[in-house]
Amino acid sequence: MLQVIKRNGQKVPFDTNKIVNAVMKAYKEIYPNNAETLVKSFANYAVNNIVNKNNFNTLDDTDVDIEDIQDEVEKFLMETDKIVAKAYITYRYKRALARDRYKLLMKDVQEKLSGENVQNQNANLDEHSFGGRMGETTDLVMKRYSLDYCMSEISKNNHLNNKIYIHDLSHYAVGDHNCLSIPFDDLLVNGFNTRQTDVRPAQSVSTAFQLIAVIFQLQSLQQFGGVSATHLDWTMVPYVRKSFAKHFKDGVRHIKNDKDYVNTIPNEMSFNDPEANCKQNKQIYKYAYDMTEKEVYQAVEGMYHNLNTLQSRSGNQLPFTSINYGTCTLPEGRLITKALLDVSIRGIGKLHKTSIFPCGIFQCMKGINRQKDDPNYDLYRLALKSTSLRLYPNYANVDWSGNAGYDRNDPKTYFSTMGCRTANGWDINGFGQLKDGRGNICPVTIIMPTLAMEAKESIYGEETDEDTIETFMRILDKKIHEAKDMLIERFERICSQNPDSAKFMYENNLMAGYDGKDIRSALKHGTLALGQLGLAETLQILIGCDHTEKKGMELAKKIEELFKTKCAEFKEKYKLNFGVYFTPEVSVGACTVMYNEKIA
């Protein structure tokens, strides 16, 4: 019996019906209105000719390659109807392309699953591990799916042609968002719900720091980017006071043995409480303060160890966490900042290693920690020491122009960052400079050197720098508009998701503004980040120098002004918070600075 050798090497019995169906599809594509019986009749006639001519109906135990059969079908159709033949050849070509892409995908999948080519492109991912291999494989498939089925051709081509990079492409299809600054003040005061249980409000500084780590981990599973605390020193003040009150009560019990007095002590006490620090309570006060200080340091160490050990994300990753601090001048807040810095300097574990997470961000603020006479200047100096020894903290300027209009009496409006690409500016949809409960929704990055090379190549003959610059600026303007469209396209996809997909986030109001029905009500307060990469290289391509020279700086300012102006226009027109950020070339996925100006 004739056996057909398939492309995977498998042998199956020869079946004329398969050829009939293939020929019918080709004829129906060209002659869709013909009666099916006529088409089928001709298909059978074609198959009989092909089979008889090649003796494919032999009863001998012979084998024939499937490609040989398809070649014969092509030949017959070319002799009888070239238009139909073209349809058949095109169909065959498309099927071949699909098979090749599938084979290539499966080859890449095999490589990831077996750990044959470990690159660890993300320092927070161990591609050798089971979870890492699963995560990388999932990313591979999801990226392909996102490109092929979830976006416009313009978006896809810009990404594939290295003109506008779509960050975290593997998450495009599922529709989760990027980063969030978590409203810890509310969560610690009110408690929160999880899928399995509910969590009571924190009643001590040690519990509060434990819950910080828990909330970081829970929220990181609702999104693909980082999570941050915007003013951790201020957030922890009431819980330091709760712990101080508990220790003070213990001191009264054991030192004074006065049960009646214990019942009059409030559940929160400031270090500056006059009664606690009066002459007759000196010994009790010292005991309570020492115990509170010890608890704070243990709580901070616990948070650092939790955030560096609990690999709670896909691919055995740690959650990308950031904490902002440094502006609270209350004694309790100063103690928190000092503990955070001291623990950072000391390092974690037996070997006192530098902590990977959380990213520390010290908030610099006029009148608070910038000058020698400022109340937190000593903490600023300690922060510099930590940075010199442990890389962290980074620094954020609360008073920079992009944070104009913030409320000095409200730490939730102080400039803070996520440590990666979240730096929220003035919210055009009503929240002003509020930082808590807002984040970056989705980012793209314009690869400017690609555009610069395109501009250079498009100029023929004796071109001048002015010609090249004009061409580049025209191309850049076009790509900024396309990047805007790509961001809105993804934003709409994210807005279409069911709130149950991120139940912890929406049920507990982690994202500000959620009306309980439409997640757009919350997402509209976040930022759509339009990144740029390779400014120095772009200048070199265009004019042969970078921004360290006057000519280069002038062009750099012109480029940045275009980004800034366009994003301000988009922000006003679409009522969405478009912002510009600079993407370091070491990793197309992080940011250092963002323009997100208040629109007058």
Image: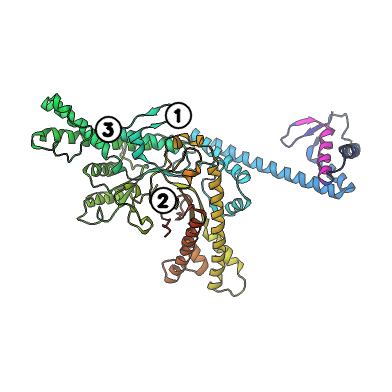
Q: Position of residue 278 (x, y in %)?
A: 10, 37
Task: Give residue 74's mark.
Answer: none
- Which residue occupies 45% across, 48% down? 525
Task: Give residue 204's mark.
Answer: 3
> Tag 1's secondary structure?
loop
- Tell which residue pokes out farthest to the bottom in this image: 462
- Local crowd size for mark 3, using a 10 Å CA cut-off: few (<14), some (14–19), many (≥20): many
Q: How does the figure colour the protein chain or chains?
A: rainbow
Q: Earlier in the sequence, mark 1 or mark 3?
A: 1
Q: Is residue 71 visible?
A: no
Rounded to the nearest angstrom, the CA distance separating label 1 from label 2 is 29 Å
Q: Which residues are magenta?
A: 11-29
> Tag 3's secondary structure?
loop
> 226 or 523: nearer the eye?
523
Per the image, the residue denoted by label 2 is 424
Q: Position of residue 523 (x, y in %)?
A: 48, 45
What amino acid is at disc 2? Asn
Rounded to the nearest angstrom, the CA distance separating label 2 from label 3 is 31 Å
> Tag 2's secondary structure?
loop
Left-right relation of 188 to 535: left
- Which residue occupies 89% across, 48% down? 79
Q: Earlier in the sequence, mark 1 or mark 2?
A: 1
Q: Quadrant of residue 250?
A: top left
What amino acid is at disc 3? Ser
Per the image, the residue denoted by label 1 is 195
Left-right relation of 181 to 28: left
